[in-house]
Amino acid sequence: MAQEQDDYGGLTGPEKAAIFMVAVGEAHSARLFAMMDDNEIRELSQAMSNLGGISAPTVERLFAEFATQLSPTASLMVSFEKKERL
C-alpha cells in the first residue's frame, strides 16, 4: 500500500483503523491508544507504518462508514475485557 490507496473495499480493518488514527490527529489518537492493549497497539502501529498516500475520498468514505456504524440504530459489540478496562 505504498502508493495512494483508492480501493476502499480492499482495506483491512487495521488499515482502516490506521487511517482513522492518522486523520483524527495526535491528541485524539493518544487517547485511543491509551485504551488499547499491547497487541492492538502493535498491530495498529504496523498498519500505520505501511500506509502510503491516502486519497481524500477514501478518508471521507472511512469517516462516513464510522458514523454509520455509530448511528443510534447500529449495535456496538464490546468484549467483557474491554468493558472492564473502560
Image: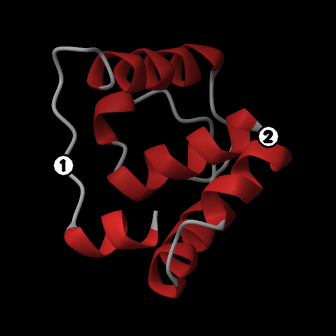
Name the residue carrying label 1. 77
Q: Is residue 11 above or below residue 62?
A: below
Q: Position of residue 52 (x, y in %)?
A: 67, 48
Occupied quadrant, residue 42 = bottom right
Q: Amino acid at mark 2?
A: Gly
Foreground: 77 or 3?
77
Say whether disc 1 or disc 2 marks the residue closer to the N-terminus. Answer: 2
> In what element is the residue under mark 1?
loop
Q: Is residue 34 left or right of residue 8?
A: right
Occupied quadrant, residue 11 = top left
Occupied quadrant, residue 46 = bottom right
Are circles 1 and 2 on residues that touch, CB within 8 Å? no
Please tell me whether mark 1 or mark 2 is closer to you in this view: 1
Q: Position of residue 64 (x, y in %)?
A: 42, 14
State the colouring used for the structure image. Answer: secondary structure
Residue at horizontal 71%, vertical 35%?
24
Q: Is residue 25 left or right of residue 24?
A: right
Q: Residues within 10 Å of mark 2 (few under 14, many from 20)?
A: few
Q: Is residue 57 visible?
A: yes
Name the residue carrying label 2. 25
Foreground: 83 or 2?
83
Q: Residues within 10 Å of mark 1 (few under 14, many from 20)?
A: few
Q: Is residue 25 left or right of residue 20?
A: right
Q: Give me the C-alpha separation between circle 1 and circle 2.
A: 25 Å
Residue at horizontal 22%, vertical 65%?
79
